Image (cartoon, helix red, strand yellow):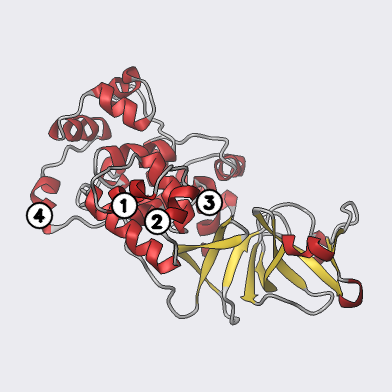
Amino acid sequence: MNFGTQIKIRRKMLGITQAELAQKVGYTSPSSIAKIETGEIDLSISKIEAIASALNIDLSSLFVTDFPIASTKASSANSTYAETAPCEIKDRIKTRRLELGLSAEKVAEMVGVSKSTVIRWENGDISSLRSDIIANLAYTLQVSPDYLILSDINTNFLSAFSAKQIGERIRERRLELGISQEHLSTELGYTSRSSIAKIESGINALTFPKIQEFAKVLQVSPAQLVGWENMQKAEKNHIPVLCGVSHKRPIFSNKLFLSCEKKTDFCFIFFGDSMIGARIHDGDIVFCRSQNMVENGEIAAVIIGDEATLKRVYYYPDKQKLVLQAENPKYEPFVYVGSELDEINIIGKAIAFQSDVI
């Protein structure tokens, strides 16, 4: 789930239109919010803060790389540093870099930018940073995204993490999923399970892009592995958000939840116009009850390949045939027969939706 999608979900949760959000953050047209939500606009730090404030959400929760990232409160050991932290992002980057004994060249290498870009950050010549760059930079400097961005330095500061702690979180999550070191090494492109063993024991440190790869396979957010957020369970009546698919299995956010009056198990944002006949439009939030089969003609959340979508389901057991029908005449039905049925994974029945369209 990307930066714009996070904003869209939160806006819909609060019942705010694009026009209302645009007005709150100082844009003259709702089209600006539409472009932000589709990832067409890179935002300045001040605009990111304004959006987070308008949506009443922790700023770091907007910084996602496939999964939501949440903030981490400073430990008491870091409180002295927090009170004296520089107020501007350019100063925080440079101060923290020097504290860690890193050269601008080394930071550039770890973040994946040029040395001149890092120098321009520290000189204040660049005010707009993509969310993935901010997350990567925060990891490199061993701080939370909030520490780099928030003008209120008393809100969020240093992240307490190390290669050993990250390794322990990887091991814990791997065991939760019942995955062997050998299987994990294969999934991540390592030639030997010993590489995973060294990572889990803290001998080998990971770059942030590699953290993202581990997070995807382990079905958690990069923030959870780094220590920017703790593993959280959904509270009563809080519905987890489907944020991706991996190996034909749904991946749910461990941080972002929505509420629904009906008894539902998960929700997701529907994209496209294939279900307009059922009054489900592009960008609507659909709430589902977990089940692996539905009655003929009911709308189901279905995983096809590496995507989750909605379709009406018609099953003909005597012919070993499954038909997935859109609610838009311009789309042909998908028909699966025999062994092709293995390609389909029904994960839930759609029972409610939230829409901006009246």
Q: Amino acid at mark 3?
A: Met
In the rendered view, does 9 fall on the left or right side of 348?
left
Give whichever of discs 2 and 1 has the lower sequence position. Answer: 2
Q: Are marks 1 and 3 in contact (CB under 8 Å)?
A: no
Q: Amino acid at mark 4?
A: Ala
Q: Which residue is mark 2?
A: 181
Q: In the structure shown, which secondary structural element does the residue marked by tag 2 occupy?
A: helix
Give whichever of discs 2 and 4 has the lower sequence position. Answer: 4
Q: Nearer the viewer, mark 3 or mark 2?
A: 2
> In the picture, which quadrant includes the C terminus?
bottom right
Q: Are marks 3 and 4 in contact (CB under 8 Å)?
A: no
Where residue 29 sits in the image (x, y, percent)?
Answer: 59, 40
Compared with 78, 264 (above or below) is below
Q: In the structure shown, which secondary structural element does the residue marked by tag 4 occupy?
A: helix
Look at 33% across and 26% down and name the residue there.
109
In the rendered view, does 261 fall on the left or right side of 47?
right
On residue 77, which mark appears? 4
Q: CA distance from mark 4 to mark 1?
A: 30 Å
Q: Are marks 2 and 1 in contact (CB under 8 Å)?
A: yes
Question: Which quadrant would residue 288 be assigned to in this image?
Answer: bottom right
Give whichever of discs 3 and 4 has the lower sequence position. Answer: 3
Q: Nearer the viewer, mark 2 or mark 4?
A: 2
Q: Which of 78 and 334 lies nearest the eye of the viewer?
A: 334
Q: Which residue is mark 3?
A: 1
Q: Which of 96 and 293 lies nearest the eye of the viewer?
A: 293
